[in-house]
Image: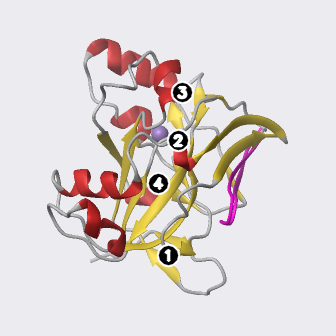
Amino acid sequence: MFTVPTPTVAIAGSADRFPVRRIFCVGQNYADHTREMGGDPDRQPPFFFSKPADAVVDTDAELPHPPQTHDLHHEVELVIALHSGGSDIAVADALRHVFGHGVGIDLTRRDLQAAAKAAGRPWDMAKGFDASAPVGPLTRGGPPAAAGIALTIDGEPRQSGNIDQMIWSVAEVIATLSGLVTLAPGDLVFTGTPAGVGPIRPGQEVRGTLDGAAPITVRFRP
Ligand code: MN
């Protein structure tokens, strides 16, 4: 009838590509970002939302400014890629399911998200739009316990943190998520963003970095 391509993410130092099954994202996993969004970092269990698999974008892409927003925001995040999965995974077993890690940008139509929150409606159109999940080339293996994570716009610092500041660790995120859905090979997990989220204007270049991983750079058309 017709074919549907499988979205993929680059693997650093390899011609192979990681096939993407689903994209899950953790909300408010750094205390300073939780506070800037008006939340309480001490009492929030991890919560999740998702993006379509074909929202992934390679580094060095040029993107149109997405429609229906006047407040497109950047959220730089550690991204975890799974080569296996299961349900009710124990925290102690979680990291063995990790294929690799990288840095991504959880692009967010913040104005649509604020309207959805106010109306008690879903976040899908605020978070899961076309090309909303740029991801840099994956580094094989799990992430280090600590690594600097940062984002610049046109070379100016906007976000800076360390993945050791995450409220819920990578293993805890995988374990908790596996209690909600059966995780599977090809799943990506965006693990939350540190403080400093803010707007991206047409024509700007956004670059996310994670120490020890390949960066993600995307340019928005004027
Ligand atoms: Mn996010």
Q: Nearer the viewer, mark 3 or mark 4?
A: 3
| Residue stretch in magenta | 205-222
Q: In this view, does 119 lie above or below 133?
A: above
- Are the residues flagged by discs 3 and 2 in contact, CB closer than 8 Å? yes
In whole angstroms, how far apart are the C-alphas of marks 4 and 2? 27 Å
Q: Which mark is residue 55?
A: 4
Q: Are marks 4 and 1 in contact (CB under 8 Å)?
A: no
Secondary element type, mark 4: helix
Residue that carries the numbered disc 2 in the rendered image: 165
Closest to the observer: 79 or 116?
Answer: 79
Q: Which mark is residue 141?
A: 1
Q: Which part of the image, by quadrant, shows the N terminus?
A: bottom left
Q: Mark 3 points at which residue?
A: 32
- Amino acid type, callout 2: Gln
Q: How far apart are marks 4 and 1 (CA)?
A: 23 Å
Q: x and y percent of residue 57 in the render? A: 57, 59
The residues tagged by marks 3 and 2 sit, at their Cα atoms, a distance apart of 9 Å
Q: Nearer the viewer, mark 4 or mark 1?
A: 1
Amino acid marked by disc 1: Gly
